[in-house]
Image (tube, rainbow, N blue to C red):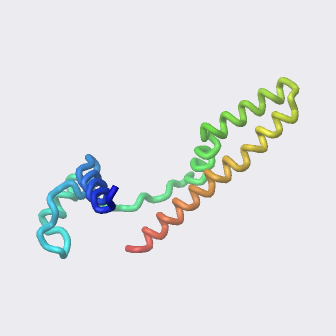
Amino acid sequence: MRRGSWTRRVSAAIKNSPGSVGAGPAPERSGGLSTAQALERLRAFGPNRMVRPRRLGRLAETLRTLADPMALMLAAAGLVYLALGERTEGFILLAALGPVLAVDVALEARSRAALKKLAGRR
């Protein structure tokens, strides 16, 4: 596949996606949107604001991390093995929770850092 055709298809898909801000007509000048276009987009999509962190954001984030389906499945399977007396298998499954949760925490931290970086560009 040629690179130009791929780029055009991706561009068209983004431009025509339902939630795309760029789905409207392109601005006529290269300096940005006209006042009328900016007001139209403000009415259609609302103001462009960063979401403020919630008061219990860390607690909610921790609960979301612990509620990860893979983590819940590993924990349940580990507890079942322990209840059946299979200590080795149970402890191995429970130990596997560490890397699964570490990946979730690392991805959340990366996302948070990216959002802070974007917020600092104002």
Left or right: where does residue 102 sit relative to residue 24?
A: right
Left or right: where does residue 70 sit relative to residue 75?
A: left
Give the answer, above or below, for where 16 lies relative to 29. above
Q: Position of residue 88 (x, y in %)?
A: 87, 35
Q: Position of residue 117 (x, y in %)?
A: 47, 70
82 or 48, which is in the foreground?
82
20 or 51, which is in the foreground?
20
Q: Where, quadrant-wise, is the C terminus in this rendering?
A: bottom left
Residue pushed farthest top? 84
67 or 54, which is in the foreground?
67
Q: Position of residue 31 (x, y in %)?
A: 18, 76
Instruction: Examine the image and state in which quarter residue 97 appears.
Output: top right
Instruction: Examine the image and state in which quarter residue 118 appears.
Output: bottom left
Residue located at (61% from left, 46% from top) = 65
41 or 30, which is in the foreground?
30
Residue located at (40% from left, 61% from top) = 50
Give the answer, above or below, for where 36 lies relative to 108. below
Q: Where, quadrant-wise, is the N terminus in this rendering?
A: bottom left
Q: Position of residue 99 (x, y in %)?
A: 70, 50
Residue located at (49% from left, 67% from top) = 116
